[in-house]
Structure formats: C-alpha cells, structure tokens
Image (cartoon, rainbow, N blue to C red):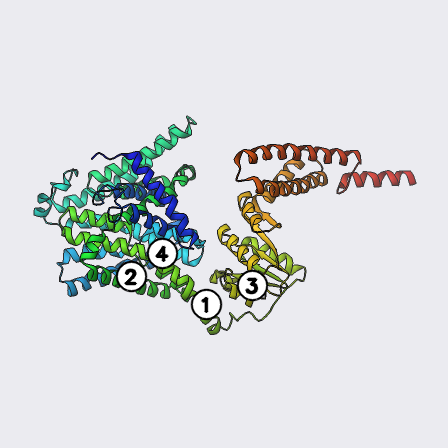
Amino acid sequence: METNFLLEAIIYLSAAVVCVPIAKRFGLSSILGYLFAGIVIGPSLFGFIGEKGQDIMHFAEFGVVMMLFLIGLELEPHKFWKMRKFILGMGSMQVLGTAAVLFYGTQLLLDWNWQTSLTVALALALSSTAIVLQTLKEKGNSNTKVGRSSFAVLLFQDIAVIPILAIIPLLASDFSIAQNEDLSHSIITDFPAWAQTLVVVGTITAIYFIGKYVLVPLLRIVAKTRLQELFTASALLVVVGVSYLMELVGLSPALGAFMAGVVLANSEFRHELEGDIAPFKGLLLGLFFIGVGASINFLLIFENPLFILIFVIALTLLKFLVLYFVGYVYNNNTDQNLQFSIGLSQAGEFGFVIMSFSTALNIVPNNLANKVLAIIALSMLFTPFLTLINERLILPNVGVKRKEEKPDDPVIDEQNEIIIAGFGHFGSTIGRLLRANKLNITVLDHDSDRVELLRKMGFKVYYGDATRVELLKAAGAEQAKLFIAAIDNPQTNLKLVELVRKNFPNLKVLARARNRIDAYELIDQGVDKFYRETLYTAVNMGVDALVQMGSRKYTATRQGQQFIRYDEETTLKLAKKRHDKMAYLVTVQEEVELQEELLKQDLYAQNEGNDHAWESDFLKKDSQEERDLRF
C-alpha cells in the first residue's frame, strides 16, 4: 500500500498535540509526551503508521540531522578552547570508562566476539543529546554547573562519533562487506577496510576546507540578493548536500549535518541561520522522539523480557556510576552530581546510527542489533521518569542533608518581611536596592553554585527549590508581607506565583514577566503587580531617543512613565480578551490610538505650564537674570 504523506503528517502532529499537553498537565517532561505519542501510533500498539517501524525512523533521522546541524553551529573554536579541560577530561573519562566496562562485561558474561562487544560498547557509551539538552532547557538549567558539565560530555560524545564511525569499517571482514547488499549505495563498498577509513577521514577533512573556502563565499553572494528565503534555501542545500556526501561514503547523514554546522559556526551567517532554523527545532526534535517511541519493538521485548530489562537496568546503573565518579572528580556537589548523572544515564540517538552501520557491515548480527535498539529506546524512555523521581523524592532529602553537613549553608533561621525567589541578574538588582535602603530580605535560589558565590559576597542566600511549599513556610512566607518572584524561567516563575497565591493568599506578590504573554498568565493568577523586562528596557531606550532628538530630559522621562502607566492599564484590558482574536485586535488598535492621544495631551499640558523641572540650562539662565536685576 502506498504511503500517504499528508495522512502520516496529520497522525504525527495529532498525536503530539494530544499527548504532550497531557504529559505537561501531570507535571511530566514534554519528551515523555512525544515518546508516548510514538508508542500509541506506532506498529506495536495501534499501528496507525509504520510497517515494522521501517518508515518511522526517516522522520526521526531528519530530526537528528537538523539537531546536529544546530549543535555544530554552536561549536565555536574559542568556546571549545575555553572549555577544553571539561570537554576532553569529563567527556573522555565517561566515554572510555563506560565503553571499557561494557566491552569486558559483554565478553565475559555474554561470550560475544570482540568486534561485536566493542561496537555495542561504543554505541551504548553515548548519551542522548536531544533528551539532555531539551530537559536542561525545560528545567532552566542550561547555564548552571549541571548544564555546563552535561554540555561538555555531550560535546565530546558528538565529536567522538566521527572516529567511532571511521573505526567501525576496520572491524568488518572483507567477506562480510561483500556479502551484504545493503551497502550498495556506498561508493567505497568494494574498497578494503583500511582504504575505507582513509576515504572517510579524507572526506571529513575535505568538507571542512571546502566549506570554509567555497561554501561560505557562495553564501555571501546569495546574501547580497537580500532574499531571505533564498538564503535559507541555500543553507539547507549545504546541509542536505554535505549529508548526502557523507551517506555516499557510508556514514550517517546526521554526521554530515554536524560537519556543515561546524563549517558555518565561524561565519558571519551563524546567528541568522540559528534564527531561521530555531522555530523548526522543537518540532523536528518532537518528531525524533515520536520516532523513537514508535520504533520500540514490544514484541521483541516480550520475547526476551529478562535479557532486555536486565540489560537496560545494568546499562543505566553503570552509566550513572561512571558519570557520578566523573562529577565527583570535577567537584560537583551532591545535588548537582545527581542531576548530571541521572540526566546522561541513557543511551543516545547515535546508538541507532552506529548499530545500523555495524549491521550493514555484518559486525553485529541482525537479531542482536534489534535487541540493542530496543535497549537504547527503553533507556531513553526511562530517563524522564528517573529525572522526575530524582526531583520529587531524592533531591529534597539530599538538599536537607547538605544543609546539615555544610556549616556555611545553615537552615533558614530568620524570617523577614520580604522574600525573593531567584537571585540572578534580575533578582540580585532588586536585592541590592532593598538592602541599600536597610530592608532585610530572605533570598531563595536553586543554583547551588550561585548560592555559594553570593554567600561569599556577603548575601544571605538559601539553597532550595522555591516551588516547594515546605521551603516557603521555612522561609517565613506565612508571616512575610511581600514576595518577589524573580526566577529566570517564565514557566517556573508562573508555577511559583500560582503556588504562593494558593497557599499564602495574604502575601503580596510582585512578579517578573519577560513579555506581555507572561503578564497575561500572571493576571490570570490574580497578580496585578507584574514587571515586564522588555517594556522598561524599551521605554528607557525610547526616552534616551527623545532626548537625543531635542526633547528635554524631564519631559521625555515623564512621557516614558506615562507610557508605562497607560500600557499597564491596556495589558489588564487585553488580558480579558486575548482568547477572542477579533475582539483582541480591535481592542489593541483602539488602545494604541488612545495611548497616543493621551500622551499628546500630556505633552501639551506640560508645554502650556512651562514646566522646566530638571532643566539645568533654564535654571542657570533664570539665576543669571535675577543677578542682573539686582545689580
């Protein structure tokens, strides 16, 4: 039966639209929603798509291709050099340590030949870049020590894929390669193993230099046309072209996309490419996770439940222990190490690539390869659950123990009238202003590195997750007068405000909002004191622009304050109508016209009153006239 592309697209998107919101509603990761969506529509359950899972991973592979392109795009040499000790140190310890234990363990316990053991060990030593980066982003941990450690290990793994895929042909015998018809697409199929390795390495090197001296100049020519869609199409052509070239020499298209990203990372087009492709990144990763969920062969698992489940548990535990040791060597705290170790304890998407490549070369038997693929998919499926257990059950207890063990991290023994949750750049500015005016504050922050640093600087900051009612009570929320929600992540900040409003209704809340959309959500929670970052920064710049164009400083500042007041009133009105698109648009147009008219009237009233406040030149002139009259 011929596949209907539009029907499959509808099924994929419908499953995501249904399953992901349900997962988020129960406080689970969106990744779990995508995985469950894939399981539901996959051949193992309802069978809406895919015949034995063959066509599903085409969607998944394209998602990985684009993901790897974006990762390569972020790999700037100066960043790599700055993090070289973490990347090479942490990454090599994790990959080599895990691979070595798996290699010797499978040989001793399962009696595999050394080629099979080495290939499987290398495939399972890699973690899922897609899952880890998406989880860090959702939890707001990308810029914490956990995020930096995770990124260092993942970056080493992504780079390590290149030599791994180059080494694999050396493990295959000439007879195995000749016997397999699946390699007919490769132009180097008939080459001896050593020649294949040289061609692969030479192709990767050639891609870098061709990209730097040919592709980037071509992109400059295209950019001069000032046609955005043509530029985006040219960039995608580079990605697809390089991916196809890698496929011709028997390597993964995803690896080619990664190389294309690295080539363009140092060009002046990097940020423009990120902006063009970023809107599609989430959808493509979602398709990848749906593909992973759909590719889980439950029939194979039911036939070999003991072997597969024990292997999954052993693999997860092994990677957790190796990662925990790596984190311990690099001085991660207990809570950081748990998040870091559990977050990377799964196998990764490159395992699919390596197993597919090794199966085509007859290094790994087909039946065993299918079992390994099931192990990879299950380990990825379990990771969000392990992360949830860690957050809900383990970290709260570990946090308490850290406070008891560390003399410089005491329990909250003071209860002030003001509580600030989140002490990054935004929250610390508020805190310094309040402290300068002799107001005592209690500060809560979930980044243990930041807590330790701020304590050394003299701030009384307490480590903990502010979205826990127990911690808020310990901080004195029941007696406090003012609560300032200043967490960087808008979703976490909204969740915190909802929690505070529900459990401490008498506590006055001031909340940080990144933009008007965030403000609408806060209004729904009954918060009338919200502070939009984009509004105040933009108004300040507008005030300076008015001054530069000849307006008086006082007049411009007054107009800016009036604009903020009118805009805040408008936001309260628009929040009630935002779900009715037509009414919302009409109200926006009316309010914009009203704001402009009111500001014109305010300006006219100021000019009529000859308001010269803050006008030093006018005051000097007036003072000089008085002196002249006296003398």
Q: Quadrant of the N terminus?
A: top left
Q: Which amino acid, mark 1? A: Gly
Q: Disc 4 to disc 2, how far (Cα)?
A: 13 Å
Instruction: Give whichever of 132, 453 is nearer the camera.
Output: 132
Res. 316 mark: 2
Question: Marks 1 and 3, Cα distance to the nearest angstrom?
Answer: 22 Å
- Sequence-wise, the earlier of marks 4 and 2 is 2
Which numbered disc, 1 or 4, marks the residue that appears first in the sequence?
4
Q: Residues within 10 Å of mark 1 (few under 14, many from 20)?
A: some
Residues packed near mark 2 inside 10 Å, few (<14), some (14 to 19) or many (20 plus) = many
The numbered dot on residue 384 is 4
Question: Is residue 146 something one can see in this rendering?
Answer: yes
Percent of width and height locating residue 296: 25, 51
Q: x%, y% of residue 600?
A: 70, 33
Q: Earlier in the sequence, mark 4 or mark 3?
A: 4
Q: Nearer the viewer, mark 1 or mark 4?
A: 4
Work out whether mark 1 precedes mark 2 in sequence or the reverse, and give the earlier one.
2
Q: Which residue is mark 1?
A: 399
Q: How many marks?
A: 4
Viewer-closest of 373 and 65: 373
Q: Which of the pair 86/49 is nearer the observer?
A: 49
